Amino acid sequence: METLIFWWGILLVDMGVYLTPIIVRHVLRLENLKGRSFTVDANNYLYQFLALIRLPDGTPLRDSDGHVTSHLAGLMFRTTRLLYEYDMDLVFVFDGEPPSLKMAEISRRRELRDKAYEEWIKALQQGDLAAAFSKAIVTSRLTRDMIEDAKRLLDLLGIPYVQAPGEAEAQAAHMALKGDVWAASSKDYDSLLFGTPRLLRYLTITGKEYLPSKGVFRPLYPELIELSEFLARHGISHEQLVDLAIMIGTDFNEGIKGIGPKKALKLIKTYGKLENLPDEIFKLVSPNFDEIRRIFLEPKVTDDYSLEYGELKEDELYRFLCDERDFSKKRVETAVKRMKAFYSRKKQRKLGEWIT
């Protein structure tokens, strides 16, 4: 299911399971989240910057050698701001190998990007920059080299990251379940299906969401969803939530036409699980439903990770960003000052804890 979301007036497509009509959320401000720790869906995070940070004609930022740098600019400036201004602890989690059932969704997204690319070129030829920009953001591609650049940047900043064996949201949820972080951060609801006790949406973005049914916009603020509260409000279990999502549609299957979140909730509360659905509905359920259950309830995760911050490698950071990727030294200095202040506060807290 797709949700239309606008960041800074830009339309994006939100992937993942669509739970908005039945979700139980608490709207917060970033100030409410000071001092909290989060796992961050890194691929999701980087895609946001690839979509948003572009030239007026929709071209992504590149260095003189043609390397895309939009994601690095967003990763550095937005992340260092969250650490510096809100004293957060962030651990980035990168996607591993996707389940085979996700191949159809990946193929569909590739087709959307290819179509958008053709429309972007057409808009450029017509001189319509506004249309060109709106099409260009859908063409974003996150390559292996771009991911390696992002990991290199995080390492130079000293910020921890984890390579997930499978879905990043599954690994993020696992770490939150263990209590290693306070919440998982992603704009998609899938982390709830993977069992995160807390999901924080819109931690790293600002903007507006377009509500097609009402034809209006609403501002976006951080949203906290407590899984236990959500399940208790509707009187369902985590396993039933997964079955509900399978009826609606996930990244691993198409949903049943005509069944949205509210109807799926009513059905699961009435019949308990997919196998108990009336025959005329059950025959429309994905034949792979049991495999999809296992993806969410028994995901591939690892305990081989560290939450410890490293150190700021200032000289190497300047060489990478300024010498290799053509960033201005002044802009990188801003990030360096933020990280120095952040690390200084962490050392003071540790000293205070030791003295106490």
Image: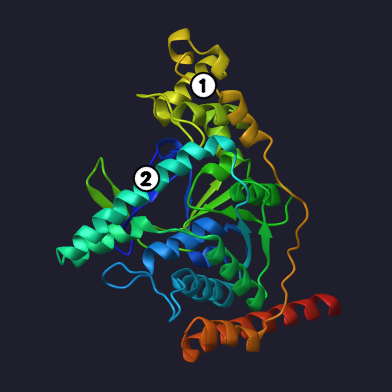
Label 2: state its secondary structure.
helix
| Residue 263 sits above or below residue 114 on the image | above
Q: Is residue 319 left or right of residue 206?
A: right
Picture coordinates of residue 64, whole percent (x, y): 43, 81
> Which residue is identified by label 2?
111
Q: Pick the quarter of the image with the C terminus.
A: bottom right
Please give the name of the residue rendered at 61% of the width and 39% of the height, measured from the top-left corner. 228
Q: Quadrant of the N terminus?
A: top left
Query: Is 29 situated above or below 292?
Result: below
In the rendering, which numbered label is found on residue 268? 1
Residue drawn at the location 47% of the way across and 84% of the way down: 326
Q: Is residue 212 above or below residue 60?
A: above
- Whether residue 206 is visible to the viewer of this picture, yes or no, is no
Upstream in sequence: badge 1 or badge 2: 2
Q: Amino acid at mark 2?
A: Glu
Instruction: Sort mark 1 into few (<14), some (14-19) or many (20+) by Cα contacts within 10 Å.
Output: some
| Residue closest to the eye, 216 or 73 | 73
Residue 22 image position (x, y, % from top left): 44, 35
Q: Choose mark 1 or mark 2, whichever is in front.
A: 2
